Amino acid sequence: MAKKHDEIAIRDADTLPIAESIESNSLLTRREMIGITGIAGFAALTGIAAGAVPQTEQKRIRIACLVSYWAFPRSHADWIITKLLDGYWWDGAHTASRVEVVSVYIHQFQESELGQKICKLKNIPIFKTVGEAVTLGGKELAVDGVVIVAEHGEYPVNLKGQWLLPRWLIYQQVIRVFEQSKRSVPVFNDKHLSTSWDEAKWMFDKSRELNFPLTGGSSIPIYFRKPEIELDIDTPIKASIVVGGTADEGAFFHCVDVLQAFVELRKGGETGIKAVQCIRGPETWKWTESNPWAGNLLESVRKSFDLKPGIFQEAKAPNVCIVEYRDGTKAAIFSGRSVGWTYAGEIEGKKEPTIISMLDWPGPFSQYHASNAQPHWITEMMVTKKEPFNAERLLLSTGIVYHNMESNWENGIYSPIGRRIETPFMNMTYRTTRGAQFSKGIRPPNVPYIRGFDT
């Protein structure tokens, strides 16, 4: 992950000087692709059976992709946008793209040579501003959907550990075009909405005011699971934990979004967050000992992976985030290695905890590394104009992360025992109706992209 901790000013996206829009070569034709890969290789890459008669292509949804940085194969822009271009792995097979990427904006353009090369290869114009990308250089909104991927780049990290990525900066410029055009389209925002609760709430509120579907969040809740199960809607969850990597704000968000994806299925639905607290260092284990519901669930995770006793307590930088829900449901997120991202829930009427893990990426440079279900649900939203899950969940996940980062700081002074922050404003309520959304079946092959150039 490319990230500098020195003071790098974030420049306004509308005034950021970059090179003129790239004039691109034509797309590789089917004949050229077969020449590169062979008929069998082409069929394997696209999931089209040899000798199959192609279906009449319907008019595809046109997407503008707005990114912070697109410079290496592990960047979120590459994981997500390339799959919108070339298709993705879903339900055990390659699925062709159903959308057309018609414009790109890159905030850190000069640093993003990979993105420049791909856009040139695919004949996609790169525009100088967000506004131009969503209007295709015109005066009004000219696309059917917007994908914002602002997860990597050379941006500063503040004292609290928040990575100051330009998500809100880009989003608010999209909103400006929506309002001027008196029309809106679905928006995807990768990871959490913002490092500021006020900005995040504004982003959510605008989606409701202007009546457009909003989604985003982590790819982990919809990654492959072991076992391949989903909790039923109205499961009587009493308490939950998630164990996973929490080394920084971005990693912590993955764990929070996993928690929310399960907890929103509880009996009565989501009721909102009452309070958030973060405890770091050895005090993590004092809190765990005094809250046996959390200790018992943590021990159940250890046993399910057959790990040695005390392994989580050996962490160099232990921490726990305590989440209190308005209906009395309890939850905690623990830092922990060797378990991927694992959810453990205490469910009324069951003797043993329910444990579900998300494990084993095939990457790191695989064509199908990490995000596959996410491009699928992005596409579904763009086509159906319906949110794949309630956007309130994305807002609550963002709020938990924000208040977790705030908890250990007060008036510029750090304390490992963070203050308990009451959050009466996080009172979003909803009842989900979604079904299982995670990847199932045969895992994708660990093969590199065929791009037409070396990366």
Image (tube, rainbow, N blue to C red):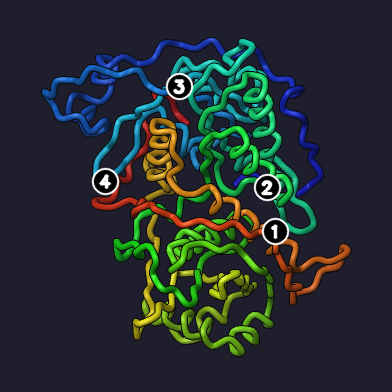
Which mark is first along the chain, 3 or 2?
A: 3
Look at 39% across and 66% down and name the residue there.
Answer: 234
Q: Residue furthest right?
A: 411
Under circle 2, the secondary element is: helix
Q: CA distance from mark 4 to mark 2?
A: 34 Å
Residue 382 is left or right of residue 412, and the answer is left
In the rendering, at what x and y percent does residue 41 appear?
Answer: 22, 30
Which mark is first along the chain, 2 or 4?
A: 4
Q: Nearer the viewer, residue 359 or 144?
A: 144
Q: CA distance from mark 2 to mark 3?
A: 27 Å
The residue that disc 1 covers is 425
Q: CA distance from mark 3 to mark 1?
A: 36 Å
Which mark is first along the chain, 1 or 3?
A: 3
On screen, residue 250 above or below 28: below
The residue that disc 2 covers is 201
The residue that disc 4 covers is 91
Which mark is first along the chain, 3 or 4?
A: 3
Q: CA distance from mark 4 to mark 3?
A: 24 Å
In the rendering, at what x and y percent does residue 269 appear?
Answer: 47, 63
On screen, residue 84 above or below 339: above
Badge 3 amino acid: Arg
Look at 50% across and 73% down and name the residue there.
Answer: 241
Q: How many marks?
A: 4
Q: Nearer the viewer, mark 3 or mark 1?
A: 1
Q: Nearer the viewer, mark 2 or mark 1?
A: 1
The residue that disc 3 covers is 62
Which mark is first along the chain, 1 or 2?
A: 2
Crowding at label 1, few (<14), some or many (≥20) Cα neighbours within 10 Å? Answer: few
